[in-house]
Image (cartoon, rainbow, N blue to C red):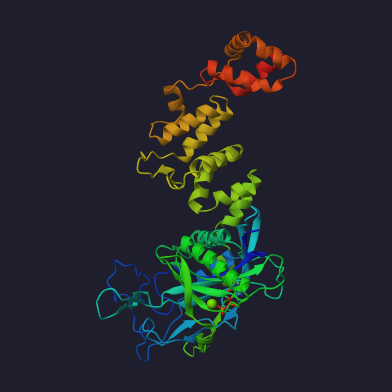
């Protein structure tokens, strides 16, 4: 369990995320204007009358966005509400000229109800994170304060683009239920899982850098073993794993210090300061906004038929959780399966390398995880390309790794030689592993005659070690193996060497 040491006791973390993903769709949630608002498009060119609240204009719900929400809901193993409503969430700010945001009211069933996603917990085991709800709402405009010294500008291109807000569930009535995010690492794995599900389904790019995925982060702490949840704070609009982690850690420590000095945490909305990694109060609890949700009279209740849900269900692709289960069936550990499904690109690469030979799976996984993932700063794992400055941009293809692994299995090369070939490939050596092995004379010696001769030479050259071995110091076997390997230029098959040595020394 992830804990933070306090002065007198250890503390555990309770984290809840409200995550907005921008829904992929040609047009906006309530208008026919293009939903593409990328920065290269001129401001205020993708705007319909209803987006900017011209009098008499009526919103029309975009059916495709609804389907996207259902698709994501199914990906979150959630109940889809057959009936849900839209409401006006009142607030006045220039980024929404209506004076309200059309959303789904918190006190009524949203389009997506209770669900769960599975992540790898900090103990390396699968862990379910419960989802409370996901609802559709419209995005707001982008305000630009840095164009003019005294004026602010507003770009309505993003106004009314569909957002799906996914909220994690905390079972406050049952504090023993641990199906919530309880560490910064679990937060990251949860968001990555949401991202991969959204991408696999084509529901969202869910890209934090581009702003198509952002999170509000709720944090509270409690002494380890405590049977109740404590007051949480909420840090809004976080757009990078690094910042979210830092905000969680800072906020947890701040709360612990308050409790340890006898104070009380107030349920405030916090602002995260990127410059120094601290949080500060943005809005006191007393000043919380009253949104006065009320039903939007322009929009009928949304009814979804069982057929629609089933039609969408029948087109669902394999999602990361199912991929993991498939990998575990291939003999991989839960840990390996989790690592290889961190992104669809990685799992596709792995699947391509395994091809139709499941017996390769374990070795392919080992090579990917210990060699490619070991240097994430240098590696674009998706393409297995060296991206470091010194990098020579050699691409290792899934086929290359498969061939390498097959050569080991067929005893054509040993593990050490395979590693050398692998490194040569990374260094830009051209050709397939077989060609490289030929070019550098890296054939493994499995010919027992040649190995026997080397073994005899080593035994004859080390009579005293032979004596010691025979009188019980069997740990010396490694010494003999090492010498035989050296004598054969590292080319001998180690298991054959072992066998022959044991035979001759007994
Ligand atoms: P609101 O709608 O007022 O923001 P919710 O009750 O919907 O509040 O909760 C928002 C998020 O905060 C949810 O993800 C929930 O799991 C989380 N949350 C609620 N209580 C706590 C708590 N004591 N500690 C940490 N997170 C919490
Ligand atoms: Mg909230």
Give coordinates of residue 248: x percent, y percent: 53, 66
- 329 with respect to 42 (left or right): right
Give coordinates of residue 408: x percent, y percent: 56, 29
The relative height of residue 189 versus residue 497 in the rendered view (above or below) is below
Tell me the quarter of the image containing the C terminus: top right
> Which residue occupies the extreme top position in the image?
460
Tell me the quarter of the image containing the N terminus: bottom right
The residue lying at 61 percent from left, 13 percent from top is 455
Give coordinates of residue 269: x percent, y percent: 51, 77
- How many marks overall? 0
> Which residue occupies the extreme right position in the image?
471
The residue lying at 61 percent from left, 78 percent from top is 264
The relative height of residue 321 versus residue 71 in the rendered view (above or below) is above
Quadrant of residue 14 within the rendered picture: bottom right
Give coordinates of residue 496: x percent, y percent: 63, 20
Give the image quadrant in which the ligand numbered 1 is located. Answer: bottom right
Residue 357 visible, this angle: no
Residue 477 visible, this angle: yes
Which of these two is toward me, 246 or 215? 246
Which of these two is toward me, 122 or 45? 122
């Amino acid at each position: 369990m992830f804990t933070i040491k306090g002065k007198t006791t250890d503390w555990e973390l309770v984290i809840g995320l409200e995550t907005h993903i921008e829904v992929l769709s040609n047009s906006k949630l309530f208008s026919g204007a293009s939903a593409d608002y990328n920065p290269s498009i001129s401001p205020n060119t993708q705007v319909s009358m209803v987006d900017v609240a011209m009098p008499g204009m009526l919103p029309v719900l975009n059916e495709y966005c609804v389907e996207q929400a259902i698709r994501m809901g199914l990906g979150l193993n959630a109940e889809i509400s057959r009936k849900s409503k839209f409401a006006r969430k009142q607030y006045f700010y220039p980024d929404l000229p209506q004076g309200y945001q059309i959303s789904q009211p918190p006190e009524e069933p949203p389009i997506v109800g209770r669900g769960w996603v599975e992540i790898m917990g900090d103990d390396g085991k699968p862990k379910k994170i419960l989802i409370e709800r996901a609802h559709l709402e419209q995005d707001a405009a982008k305000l630009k304060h840095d164009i003019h010294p005294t004026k602010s500008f507003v770009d309505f291109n993003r106004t009314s683009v569909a957002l799906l807000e996914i909220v994690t569930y905390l079972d406050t009535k049952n504090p023993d239920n641990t199906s919530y995010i309880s560490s910064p690492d679990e937060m990251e794995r949860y968001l990555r899982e949401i991202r991969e599900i959204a991408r696999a389904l084509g529901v969202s790019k869910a890209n934090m850098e581009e702003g198509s995925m952002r999170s509000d982060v709720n944090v509270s702490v409690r002494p380890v073993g405590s049977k109740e949840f404590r007051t949480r704070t909420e840090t809004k609009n976080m757009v990078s794993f690094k910042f979210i982690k830092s905000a969680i850690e800072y906020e947890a420590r701040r709360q612990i210090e308050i409790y340890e000095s006898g104070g009380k945490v107030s349920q405030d909305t916090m602002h995260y300061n990127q410059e120094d990694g601290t949080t500060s109060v943005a809005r006191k609890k007393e000043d919380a906004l009253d949104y006065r949700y009320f039903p939007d009279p322009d929009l009928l209740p949304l009814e979804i038929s069982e057929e629609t849900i089933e039609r969408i269900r029948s087109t669902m692709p394999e999602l990361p959780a199912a991929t993991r289960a498939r990998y575990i069936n291939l003999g991989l550990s839960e840990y390996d399966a989790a690592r290889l499904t961190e992104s669809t690109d990685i799992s596709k690469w792995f699947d391509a390398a395994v091809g139709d030979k499941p017996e390769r799976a374990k070795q392919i996984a080992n090579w990917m995880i210990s060699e490619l993932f070991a240097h994430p700063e240098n590696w674009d794992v998706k393409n297995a390309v060296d991206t470091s400055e010194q990098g020579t941009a050699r691409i290792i293809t899934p086929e290359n790794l498969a061939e390498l692994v097959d050569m080991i299995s067929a005893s054509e090369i040993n593990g050490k030689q395979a590693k050398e070939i692998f490194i040569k490939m990374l260094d830009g050596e051209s050709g397939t592993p077989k060609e490289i092995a030929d070019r550098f004379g890296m054939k493994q010696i499995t010919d027992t005659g040649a190995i026997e001769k080397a073994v005899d030479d080593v035994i004859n050259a080390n009579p005293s070690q032979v004596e010691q071995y025979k009188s019980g110091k069997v740990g010396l076997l490694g010494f003999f193996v090492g010498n035989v390997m050296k004598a054969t230029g590292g080319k001998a098959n180690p298991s054959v060497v072992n066998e022959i040595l044991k035979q001759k020394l007994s």
